[in-house]
Amino acid sequence: MQIISAEEVQQTLSFETLVPALQVAYSADFGMPQRQIYPLLGGSQEKHDTFALLPAWTQDVLGVKTFTHYPQNPEKGRLMVAAQVLLFSKETGAPLALVDGTSLTYWRTAAISALAASYMARKDASTLLLFGTGELASYMALAHASVRPITKVYVHGRSVDKMQATQQKIQQARPDIEVVICDRYEEVITQVDIISCATASPTPLFESSLLAAGMHIDLVGNHHTTCRECDSATIKMSHVIADSYLNVFGEAGEILIPLKEGIIEESHVKGELAELCSGKVKGRLNNSQTTLFKSVGTALADVASAYLVYQNLS
């Protein structure tokens, strides 16, 4: 069995190859039971540690991702998320590889958002507002720039140092893109084409009244039933697609809170990513429509991404 390190994941992947590979995986037959998230004792509802198991299979490979999520680790100088993906041959059942899942998670999360944006964002989308300055932030900007002609990225966060670090990472990878530190998002939000949110915020990051027609909103930071990165009004006004019905309706406060409030019904979520990729649902009906993609993460994305790394190194 091959052991694939984080360094090998980083050297092997690109959004130009990963996004199309995920499109193929989501368009074909696959299996994906509901993921299991096990809360560990201690901490608040939003801050408790968790252990998770995510199984999935494609026509070629079986796999399971396991990860731990310890929200208070960064305060102690440790990673918040640690993960591994174990792959097996679909034909023989033999183990193929153990792939570093921590680095892979950054790539697949951003690539899934970019895949959704390739159907949902306007084709001429050129400006992006990025909420969040964690490890995932630069991946989100670069992934969206791989599917849309992004020329300017605004970076908004709570720490100037982290905003500057995110700015540098994006510029090093894409010097052709102008990256601007944005202390007051209110001054630019009405001008952007895409909003991408990858934060740990338990409350909405922006007001729905600030959103311009034709905008695409991407939400990946929250997977708690009582937290959300946008308000109910934003959900109600948007054409909403989920990465997975099963996971989003079980975990995402962005959807569950307005459902509980009676502001929307389940049918307000117009489809999931597999239906988008197979053409069963539309990502955008016109250029003035506000679109929104809510992602909490799926095992299929992990397994398909890990298999691409394995193929490239074999």
Image (cartoon, helix red, strand yellow):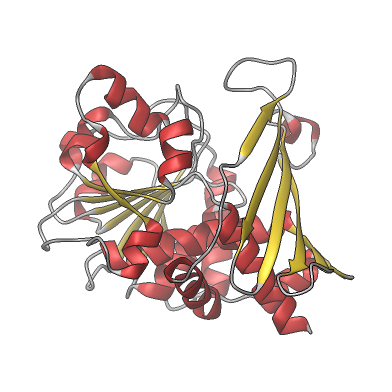
Residue 167 is at least partly visible in this image: no
The residue lying at 73 percent from left, 75 percent from top is 91
* Residue 171 image position (x, y, % from top left): 52, 69
* Image quadrant in which the N terminus is located: bottom right
* Residue 156 image position (x, y, % from top left): 43, 45
* Residue 203 image position (x, y, % from top left): 40, 25
The answer to whether 298 is drawn above or below residue 262 in the figure is below
Q: Viewed as shown, does residue 131 lie left or right of 35?
A: left
Q: Viewed as shown, does residue 15 lie left or right of 179?
A: right
The residue lying at 41 percent from left, 70 percent from top is 145
Q: Viewed as shown, does residue 151 lie left or right of 131?
A: left
The answer to whether 13 is drawn above or below residue 247 in the figure is below
The answer to whether 237 is drawn above or below residue 216 in the figure is above
Residue 100 is at least partly visible in this image: yes
**Furthest residue toward front:** 92
The residue lying at 20 percent from left, 44 percent from top is 238
- Answer with the quarter of the image where residue 307 lies: bottom right
The residue closer to the viewer here, 1 or 183, is 1
The residue lying at 39 percent from left, 35 percent from top is 229
* Image quadrant in which the C terminus is located: bottom right
